[in-house]
Amino acid sequence: MDSGDMAWMLISTALVVFMVPGLALFYGGMTRSKNVLNMLMMNMVCIGLVPLLWVLFTYSLGNNGNEDQGWFEFGGKLIGNFDVAGLDGIAGEDLIGVAFFMTFASITPALISGAVADRMKFSAWVVFAAIWSIIVYTPVTYWVYTGFHHTGGFGISADLPALDFAGGTAIHINAGVAALALVLVLGKRKGWPSEPMAPHNLTMVLLGTGILWFGWFGFNAGSAGAANGQAAQALMNTFVAPAAGMLSWLLVEKLRDGHATTLGAASGVVAGLVAITPAAGYVSTLSSIVFGLVAGVGCYFAIQLKGKFGYDDSLDVVGVHGVGGILGGLLLGLFASADVGGTDGLLYGEGKFFLTQIVAMLTVIIYSFFVTLALAKVLDLTMGLRADEEDEHEGLDLTQHAERAYSNA
């Protein structure tokens, strides 16, 4: 790395760290006032817990396919390394890669927290986030960023691998599917869906949205790994796609419900950000508009499904992150341009690439869902996942943390 590239990666890493408190505000504003501190804590604890696991061993397992450091084989392929120091042989400028990907690992379980708002024990969440990061996120990030891109991989063609520029599959689909599995075990909030459970602070939601969007420039453009033209394209796409996502969500709201809402604007921005994430450095600016428009409409209708199917995804993690990630991966298979990122999609004549995108996403969906489901069931049978009914009624801020977000005075 030259000094310019290093400076950009240092800035990008800091921007992604900032996304975690942004996500906490975004989710916290959408909860009821008696649970806002609990939601903030569920997010913030992830940047206390996950980085320690990362530097001890999960980085080595998930991101290092070096033959000299492989610690076991699976299907003839070396899978990472395991050393108790965690970063053996990694020093100097190489650490920026460790730190940058550590921010991705930290925010992924935090995304799941929105699905279980208002009812999960904090102690159970901490244990879940730690184990999930090890047994779900770590192998998935290896498959997506090592296995899917190299010979053999996880059954994906080495000649035309699946692509995920900044985490549409590894982060958003992974978290969205895991969220669905977790809420199926956890159960519905008391009173849902008959009782109103409106966001308590939309000002906080918009502030969180702005912080997320700001940090997402580091998330996506930083994934270029350098201060170059691809980073500039990713930055531009990260501006345009969520703008289109906001407008398309608001249009659907206005046509269906008669009002364009603040929550809808925020949700449309996040839907557009999620959808463009896997494609940010692989598609043109005009194509990114399509990503945002499709995500705004698609995610709006996706969140209506929870009422029809009866699963209580409190803050629409499944509908926005899961569905948004899938839409982004499929659209990447269509719109990828060799002029931008070196690979053409189906619209440019490469049907095989579109198929590998589907296989990659299905692999992650199946693995994440069933492993998360098993983990949730084991934790529920042992320590219990759910807060007591009385605690849930009183509010998790007071019962889990002995604090109130707002004074009664």
Image (cartoon, grey):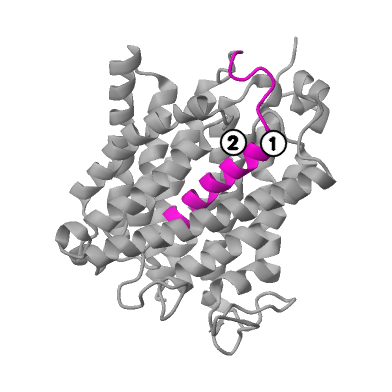
Whole-percent x, y for residue 62 in the image: 58, 70
Q: Which residues are magenta?
A: 168-194
Front position in the image: 296 or 386: 386
Give the structural element (helix, strand or loop) at label 2: helix
Q: CA distance from mark 2 to mark 1?
A: 10 Å
Query: Can residue 401 be seen in the rendering of this structure?
Result: no
Report whether 266 appears left or right of 122. left
The residue under label 1 is: 186
Kindly report the secondary structure that dominates the magenta region of the rendered protein.
Answer: helix
Residue positioned 58% across, 29% down in the render? 314
Query: Can residue 288 be seen in the rendering of this structure?
Result: yes
Q: Examine the rendered structure and indicate whether residue 63 appears above or below residue 168.
A: below
Where residue 296 sits, quadrant-wise, is top left
Whole-percent x, y for residue 357 in the image: 35, 60
Residue positioned 27% across, 37% down in the render? 293
Q: Which mark is nearer the camera, 2 or 1?
A: 1
Residue positioned 76% across, 19% down in the render? 393
Q: Amino acid at mark 2?
A: Ala
Q: Which labelled disc corresponds to residue 133? A: none
The residue under label 2 is: 115
Q: Amino acid at mark 1?
A: Leu
Quadrant, the N terminus: bottom left
Whole-percent x, y for residue 46 in the image: 66, 49
Report whether 234 appears left or right of 147. left
Quadrant, the C terminus: top right
Queried whether the magenta region covers residue 83, the answer comes back as: no
Report whether 62 appears left or right of 284. right
Q: Residue furthest top?
A: 409
